[in-house]
Amino acid sequence: MSFDEARLADDRRRALAALRDGRRFLLVGHERPDGDVLGSQVALARVLRSLGKTVVIQNPDPAEPHFDTLAPAEEFGVYAGGPLPEHDVAVLLDFSELHRTGPMAPEIARAPSRKLVIDHHLHSGELWWDAAYRDPSAAATGVLVAQIAAELGVELDREAAAGVFTALVSDTGWFRHSNTGAEVFRLAAQLVDAGVEPSTLHAGLYQRRNPESPAVLGQLLSRARYLHGGRVALIDLPLDAGVPEHLAEGDGALDVLRSVEGLEMALYVWERRPSHWRLSARAKGDAQVHGLALRFGGGGHRKAAGATILGERDDVLRRLELAVAQELESAHAGMRAGGPA
């Protein structure tokens, strides 16, 4: 066993001990929680409560309305400032950088509770937590929650299984992305056996869009520019474009762009508030975007990553386009050397 494998195994042992020994748990997700965050929170909350634990879910931002399919199982609390709920273990799901909790970060840092990370993203930087259950090869954080349930001897009930399934389909693009391996389908089959109805869940999550959404999608796609001979597509959305924040999610546009032949990277950068731009980056084929996000202090996966970029529009786009060029050159140099960059 290598040093890294030994360290990860030791982290997991301490993580499981914290879950067994803790009494009051606070489950926290990153800003703008997605299906992997929310599904994992539902599943872990159900598992912990079955063991007699007290559990509160609180996120820095509210869940999007279509996630109310999970709401009957759990209430997704939203941090409104001030002290955190009483807890002895804070569980951070689907991220490992404390700043991604936004306004909650200072309170989490100063709380005397143990800090436990459950995450499948690549991590760079200080290992600041008390324990972690991590695996960057896992398709979703929900996969890790399912593994934790098994190690704790808890069988997933239908609500917990729906949470894991939501996490799984959110991060695999409903089994379309390259992180969809045989183990994903095996887990999905187990979740269906536990009572998940995929067609019902799909309708609840993906077939309830705002009537304005198609027009906004068209607006976003009309702003796409192709760079580097069609290898990269870039959409930028400034505040003055007039798109309401709840409709500015760019995943639909990124999916369309990734369908373009020859495209390696699809990038969407939108101004959430003045001079604060959110980058969402997607890759296909042999391309990667994790390094691009790292250049701006972000992170994520090889094929899907993000970051926050501060500055005025022209400067942000200049820096982003320069970083893209550097990433492509680095990848090309790696290929010339006979291996990945």
Image (cartoon, rainbow, N blue to C red):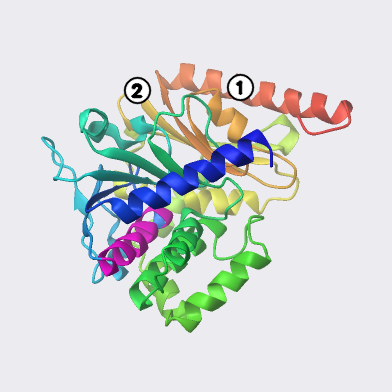
Q: Residue 228: where, in percent of width, then height?
A: 72, 30
Q: Residue 225: where, in percent of width, then height?
A: 60, 36
Q: CA distance from mark 2 to mark 1?
A: 19 Å
Where 247 sits versus 301, above or below?
A: below
Numbered disc 1: secondary structure? helix
Where 322 sits versus 61, above or below?
A: above
The magenta segment is: 36-51
**Residue lying furthest left in this view?**
82
The kind of residue on which mark 1 rests is Ala
Quadrant into which the C terminus falls = top right
Residue 174: quadrant of the picture:
bottom right
Q: Residue 136: where, in percent of width, then height?
A: 58, 45
Numbered disc 2: secondary structure? loop
Residue 195 visible: yes
Asked if residue 37 lies in the magenta stretch, the reply is yes
Residue for point 20% across, 61% down: 75
Q: Label 1: which residue?
A: 323
Q: Label 2: which residue?
A: 275
Where 200 sits versus 141, above or below?
A: below
The kind of residue on which mark 2 rests is Ser
Residue 31: quadrant of the picture:
top left
Residue for point 46% across, 79% down: 199
Apparent side of residue 260 relative to residue 67 in the rendered image (left or right): right
Which mark is first along the chain, 1 or 2?
A: 2
Quadrant into which the N terminus falls = top right
